[in-house]
Image (cartoon, rainbow, N blue to C red):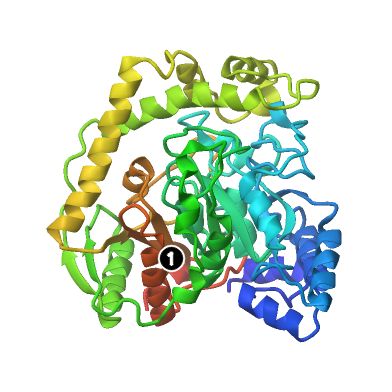
Amino acid sequence: MGLLALALMAAMPAVAQNVVETSIEELQAKMALGTTSEAITKEYLERIAAMDRKGPTLRSVIAVTSGALDQARASDARRRAGKLLGPLDGIPVLIKDNIETWELPTTAGSLALRSNWTKRDAPVVALLRAQGAVILGKTNLSEWANIRSTASMSGWSATGGLVRNPYALDRTACGSSSGSGAAIAASFAAVAVGTETDGSVVCPASMNGLVGLKPTLGLVSRTHVVPISHSQDTPGPMGRSVKDVALLFSAMIGDDPADPATKGAARHARDFAAALSPDALKGVRIGYWKPQMPGELGKRFDQALEELRAAGAVLTEVKMPKLEGMSEAEFLVLKAELKADLAAYLATTPEKTVKVRTLADVIAFNQANAGAEMPFFAQEIFEEAEKTKGLDDPEYKAAREKSLRLAKAALDGMMKEANAQLLVSPTYGIPWLSDPVAGDQFSGPSASALPAISGYPHLTVPMGLVKGLPAGLSFIGPAFSDGDLLRAGYAYEQATQARVKPGYAPTVPADLGARTLN
């Protein structure tokens, strides 16, 4: 650890350490031996108070739930009565602030929604509550889930400020589930729920040294989640280990009559954690492709391929097909659905406190409050979306058909070419410098688009550090292969133990680059 990092840590107030890097299973073991959920919840709240707006100033949590300790005490009472509700009972969980919880407003990071207190739970939150999870608070995010501007700075919102990466505080936490990623890396809760339209779970998970699952579309309800696209949106679990993610995911699946995509979801529900095995890669056929990437990341990916082989996987290289026009078609779909889906959501919010009812209203609000809402970047995507012609527009329908067809054909074709059960690739590059002038500076690969567009599941697992910064390995499979991805990711995780906990360095020490590929 560099001198600057040591000085920063020395300046931090004493912070609770009993919950640092502690898994759900370990927390449950502590509670079985007499530690209370109330005590655990207090420790997480103490860490948030000491580190989120103080100390390293991660700005990962927008608000904590005032009744979190009451929830924890109720769990303790159930434990004493022998009436626990499931493996999440008493476990603190953070929720991205575009997902409604009844105790807090749901802002999507925007001042336009600062009074959006609907006093209802999103169905995915209700499912967690039904298993006894402690809803600890709401996490910061890239405002409006990063759909406002092509020049945006991931992790920034007018409500929460800029989320900082716990591995190097001047680096991006990626987005849009930036706060969920940084908070769980910093052990502010056991696990968190993020959301993804294209990359918004797997990018922050990868760049904060976490496991993140973008589930098969339709397994998890989107009702009472501030939307972008009904074709691609889904909540997803994020945690420090595959087992924690599997436990959280198992509690999130369910049918929701208000979300037609989830019809039949419950038949796919199971205890995904129970099926995990360190031997799960033996004999599994995996296809991989090598995107353009910096040399250090390429070396780390080559090492990951060797680690997969050593764990028993059979690997075959495949070629990424040409995807001409897919990105442009996807972008049109997202803009058209944003306009329609956001208006439908806003119509359900409290009229007395939420004055924006359409995308046009949000655009006008941002213009009227430009100093607070647009100090770094504008809203040109919003303005383009407002010009779209609705969900009956033939151009929109053709774009959805094209993007979906190309994405599915690419993934199905690569799996067929390799006779493979799943595919692997680097998830993204490594975290770039947060820059309010230049905005995001994506470099290297991105594995998110094809599973996002197709609705197929996508799991990222820590691949270790590259130049002192986290990198992720993606596992992608066909629809409803979420359990297969979790099993494969778990076996890889157990074989490599590649995750490194964060050090809250102000920046990346120059000498780390040579030491992180070993």
Q: Which residue is mark 1?
A: 461
Which quarter of the figure has residue 17? Answer: bottom right
The x and y percentages for residue 181 are 57, 56
Q: Secondary structure at mark 1?
A: strand
**Does residue 34 appear left or right of residue 29 in this picture?**
right
**Does residue 312 appear left or right of residue 362 in this picture?**
left
Q: Quadrant of the N terminus?
A: bottom right
Q: 89 or 175: which is nearer to us?
A: 89
Q: Quadrant of the C terminus?
A: bottom left
Residue 13 in sight in this render: no
Which quarter of the figure has residue 342? Answer: top right
Q: 254 or 288: which is nearer to us?
A: 254
Name the residue at 25% across, 30% down: 402
Most extreme residue toward the bottom, as rendered? 33
Q: 73 or 95: which is nearer to us?
A: 73
Question: Would you place residue 459 above or below residue 195 in this image?
Answer: below
Name the residue at 28% across, 80% down: 282
Question: Would you place residue 495 above or below residue 357 in this image?
Answer: below
The x and y percentages for residue 458 are 39, 55
